[in-house]
Image (cartoon, rainbow, N blue to C red):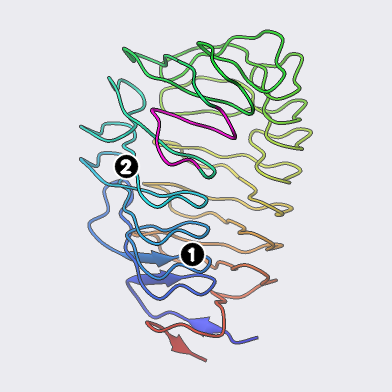
Amino acid sequence: MACTRYESGTIEAAGYESGTIEAAGYESGTIEAAGYESGTIEAAGYESGTIEAAGYESGTIEAAGYESGTIEAAGYESGTIEAAGYESGTIEAAGYESGTIEAAGYESGTIEAAGYESGTIEAAGYESGTIEAAGYESGTIEAAGYESGTIEAPGYESGTIEAAGYESGTIEAPGYESGTIEAPGYESGTIEAAGYESGTIEAAGYESGTIEAPGYESGTIEAPGYESGTIEAPGYESGTIEAPGYESGTIEAPGYESGTIEAPEQQSSAHTT
């Protein structure tokens, strides 16, 4: 396995060649993830896209198998999806082509979030509903600026936020005070993601936290304005990463176990050691 060591201004992971990403207050930078060729941020199988976080004005992002789309987060002015205080927007998830928010196999639906005026969301196998999640019976959720709430996702029966098969967990989002969320197959954690067992994460304005990503066991990550943290990527076991403005850190890419940055054998814009 080749170990690709970056020198500056770039972060290339699993087979990326180039790309750029800007985070809270960042001015520029580049990051490449699993198999991406270009984009200000490309994720799992994306071809191109851009994303701007905390304080950004515009940008686009493509997720799992998407070809295009836009998303704006806290403090954004426009985008195909606006969060916390947004008025409207659209986002495409897992294999979606279009929709104000279409999730795993949904056809239609509507949902309104913190300060939103309108929008639509489709969840696992739903056909319609102001908020219907895969096999949920009931629940409530409060977003941006909410203090508490509960929601049930695919197969959930109850929870302050339970997602695909989660049992319990907690998460804090921009302006949130507290809450819990469970993600697919998670049992507990302040936030557990695809196949994670536990972890915590703090977003916009957070000071510290930890998060585990698909297949990760543990790790921590700090977002815009963070000083340090660790993150594990698909199939990684451990590692640390620092984003624009960070001082130091390490990251492991798909299939890596450890390293200051281990990327696939091919990296066009990095020096292989």
Q: How far apart are the alpha carbons under marks 2 and 1?
A: 18 Å
Residue bearing mark 2: 70
Tell me if residue 164 is in the magenta stretch.
no
Pick the front one: 183 or 250: 183
Pick the front one: 167 or 133: 133
**Quick check: 117 above or below 198?**
above
Left or right: where 5 falls relative to 220:
left
Q: Position of residue 256 (x, y in %)?
A: 66, 72
Which secondary structure is most common in the magenta stretch? loop
Q: Residues within 10 Å of mark 1 (few under 14, many from 20)?
A: many
- Mark 2 or mark 1: which is in front? 2
**Quick check: 213 above or below 46?**
above
Q: Outermost residue, bottom direction?
A: 273
Q: Residue at x 43, y 53 (%)?
A: 227
Q: Position of residue 17 (x, y in %)?
A: 40, 76
The number of callouts visible is 2
Q: Which badge, 2 or 1, comes first in the chain's sequence?
A: 1
Look at label 1 and name its amino acid. Answer: Ala
Where disc 1 sits, the SS reads loop
Q: Quadrant of residue 244?
A: bottom left
Q: Residues within 10 Å of mark 2 (few under 14, many from 20)?
A: many
Quadrant holding the N terminus: bottom right
Identify the mark at residue 33; answer none if there is no mark. Answer: 1
**Quick check: 98 above or below 136?**
below
Q: Residue at x 48, y 23 (%)?
A: 121
Pick the front one: 58 or 108: 108
Magenta part of the protein: which range? 96-106
Q: Residue at x 65, y 33 (%)?
A: 190
Q: Residue at x 24, y 42 (%)?
A: 56
**Quick check: 133 above or below 18?**
above
